[in-house]
Amino acid sequence: MFLVSWQDILDTFRVCFSRLSFRMFREIKQLEILFNSVHQHTILPLFLVAAMICPAISIFLCVGFHNEMPIPLLGFLGLVTFDGMFVILFYLFGYAGRIYGRSRNIIEAWRHNRKTQTDKLAKRYLKALIPIKIRFGATNFMDQSTCLVCVQFTITQAASMLLASKR
């Protein structure tokens, strides 16, 4: 929910260019620092691990034990897979990655803008700008391909569990 509002703010930067835009971008960077200081080491890694482990185990159980499981349990495990993979990984982490990509595109568009190439103060501001990064763990951040890497890891782990159990 909070990520969508950041995305909308970043979309407005693409349209407008002024010193006010630089100031607003700096304020968003301050929000990024606050967000990362609160969620970087606890909540986001927990979501990431849960969003990868739960679908891997439920895929393993659905495929490996589909003959021995009752239909309602099979449906529940399918919902766990759907919630973990598509809702959390694609939606939440996908938007976090898009924030990084769009902020990087905005900075590049500002650097190639004719107004910034002639204004010395704007050039200095642009040298100091860093794209917005939603961080998890010590040094990692959400990129545009983070959700795809997580889904690939989840499916690989489910396949490894199936091969290890010989089912």
Image: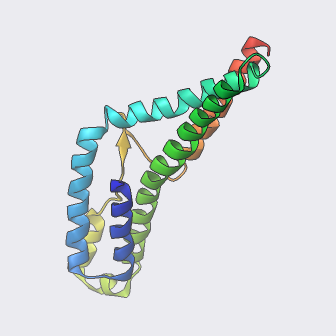
Percent position (x, y) of residue 127? 29, 66
In which quadrant will I find the C terminus?
Answer: top right
**Residue 24 visible (yes or no):** yes
Considering only vertical position in the picture, is 42 above or below 105? above
The answer to whether 87 appears left or right of 152 in the picture is left
Report the residue at 54% width, 27% height from top: 53
Q: Using the rendered view, name the quadrant where residue 70 is placed.
A: top right
Task: Answer left or right for 156 relative to 163.
Answer: left
Q: Quadrant of residue 72?
A: top right
- Tell me if I can see residue 124 in this picture: no
The residue closer to the viewer here, 106 or 166, is: 166
Q: Looking at the image, is 155 positioned above or below residue 122?
A: above
Where residue 102 appears, as percent x and y from the top left, is 43, 65
> At which x and y percent is residue 29?
25, 58
| Colour setting | rainbow
Which residue occupies the foreground of this view, 118 or 102? 102
Residue at the spot x=36%, y=43% of the render?
A: 135
Task: Find residue 153 and report its horizontal and vertical position in percent.
Answer: 61, 33
Of 163 and 111, nearer the camera is 163
- The N terminus is located in which quarter? bottom left
> Which residue is found at the position 74% from the left and 18% from the top?
65
Q: Nearer the viewer, residue 53 or 70?
A: 70
In the figure, is residue 35 to the left or right of 154?
left
Numbered disc total: 0
Quarter holding residue 137: top left
